[in-house]
Amino acid sequence: MTLAIPPLAFQFASPGPIFINIGPITIRWYGLLIASAVLIGITLSQYLAKQRKVNPDLIGDLAIWLVIGAIPAARLYYVLFEWSEYAQNPERIIAIWQGGIAIHGAIIGGLLAALIFARIRQVSFWQLADLVAPSLILGQAIGRWGNFFNSEAFGSPTNLPWGLYIPPQMRPPELANFAYFHPTFLYESLWNLMVFALLITLFVRDVRGKQRLKTGTLFLTYLVTYSLGRVWIEGLRTDSLMLGSLRMAQIVSLTGIAIGLAGLVWLYVYKRALPDVVEEVRGEG
């Protein structure tokens, strides 16, 4: 039985993954959105760095490391958990433009890259993390729309007015008779925008002296708030990466919540600084 068509659902369907074809060159929405998120994120973090009196060129240098660390790690993370599929089609492993990257893989890869960068440049990792956190969550909000254009990362069937139409070839076999699904990409994008608003509000209050924040607060708040949303949104999805019978994204998110809360307690209850890779210094020069 096919789920009843929800009112207004005809207004919510992907136009397809292709943004434009220019001769032999194909520009896909997925890649365009990722590139846009990176550029917007760099610009924003450099602006935030100026407000904190940190050399914005430091952020530009860090961005190169983050891209090199995050994007391959995001793809590798996804491929490893879908290895049964990619083992049969190894040529698709590098086809990142078709979708199939995991944000948790990107975060892990980016963190490792930032730690190495901080060590080499002798700057505070936590200071860098605070400057990047708002850009990271904004980039996630933008990047999620790549899932919309690829008709992926959707949730379970629904007859709600905002149900997302999924083409038959993109539906799981067991749900082939359903046409409309929860737009979990949209839920997460909106959640991420709320987290972004929270982080920017905290940053502005800190810069203006209304609520002084300890170094590391913004990134730890990002860990907690993003992960809280991901836990419940992931429960709606039909394409979760699995570890046995467990949804991997929920496991990682719960871990992120625990780490973030522990860090905030350390900062504001025990009133101690977070252990850093180097002594905290400004990024001038």
Image (spheres, grey):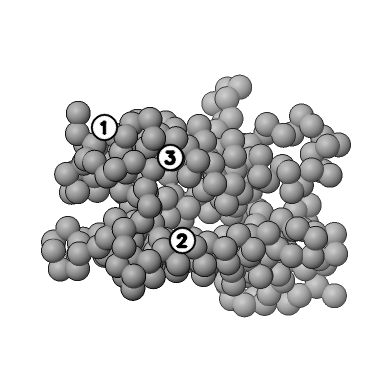
Residue at x 21% of width, y 40% of height: 282
Above or below residue 72? Residue 144 is below
For this rendering, which residue is in front, 62 or 31? Answer: 62
Which residue of the protein is positioned furthest toward the top in this rendering?
24
Q: CA distance from mark 3 to mark 2?
A: 16 Å
Q: How many marks?
A: 3
- Residue tagged 1: 57
- Relative side of 276 to 53, left or right: right
Whole-number angstrom distance, CA of label 1 to CA of label 2: 25 Å
Rendering coords of residue 16 (x, y %): 62, 47
Crowding around mark 2 (Cα neighbors within 10 Å: few <14, some 14 to 19, many 20+) is: many
Q: Earlier in the sequence, mark 1 or mark 3?
A: 1
**Amino acid carrying mark 1 in the image:** Asp
- Looking at the picture, which amino acid does disc 3 mark? Ala
> Going 52% across and 62% down the picture, which residue do you hit?
256
Q: Which residue is mark 3?
A: 114
The answer to whether 180 is drawn above or below residue 64 in the figure is below
Q: Position of residue 266 (x, y in %)?
A: 38, 66
Residue 208 lies, in percent from the top left, at 13, 61
Q: Which residue sits at x=84%, y=44%?
A: 84
Quadrant of the image for the N terminus? Answer: bottom right
* Mark 2 residue type: Leu
SS for callout 2: helix
The residue under label 2 is 223
Q: Which residue is nearer to you in this view: 8 or 64?
A: 64
